[in-house]
Image (tube, grey):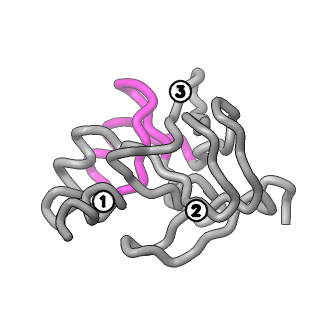
Amino acid sequence: MTKENRRFVVRRTVTGLGLFAVEPIPAWKRIVEYTGPLVSTKEVETRRGKYFFEINTKWSIDGSPRSNTARYINHSCEPNAESFVSGKRVWVWSRKDIQAGEEITMDYGPAYVEDYILPVGCKCERCRTKQE
């Protein structure tokens, strides 16, 4: 187990599996890299999957390998983390203080939300609370 993996734990959530902080994470700290093979946009269009992270108009990262810890970060309409593209790498940073035991979440963006989340309904904390 790497030091990075000791900072997180994958647990079951309402949406499947989620990534949770084991220790507090201060605001605006780099948390984890979104990793996986680099694939061309043309290849993404012919493959199925929901773990593709577009880094520019020509390339995406296929984040489907289970070794990609960041793939377990779920969508939230009120996220506590966000992603930044640096060259052909994607880094996830905390937007605010994240407490030990808190789920790490990001806003996946309008295209992903429209294609994958809205058809089944958003299940993030904010949206579930609104529905109750």
Task: Name the residue carrying label 2.
Answer: 19
Single out the mark in the foreground, 2 or 3: 2
Q: CA distance from mark 2 to mark 3?
A: 20 Å
Q: Are marks 3 and 1 in contact (CB under 8 Å)?
A: no
Which residue type does callout 1 highlight?
Arg
Q: Secondary structure under badge 2?
A: strand
Q: Position of residue 94 (x, y in %)?
A: 60, 38
Q: Quadrant of residue 41?
A: top left
Answer few, some or many: residues within 10 Å of disc 3's Cα (few below 14, many 20 plus, some between 14 and 19).
some
Q: Quadrant of the C terminus?
A: bottom left
Which labelled disc corresponds to residue 48? 1
Quadrant in which the N terminus appears: bottom right
N-term mark: 2 or 1: 2
Eyeballing the image, is 94 above or below 51? above
The residue depicted at 73 percent of the width and 62 percent of the height is 22
Circle 3: element type: strand
Which stretch is magenta? 37-61
Amino acid type of the residue tagged 3 in the rendering: Val
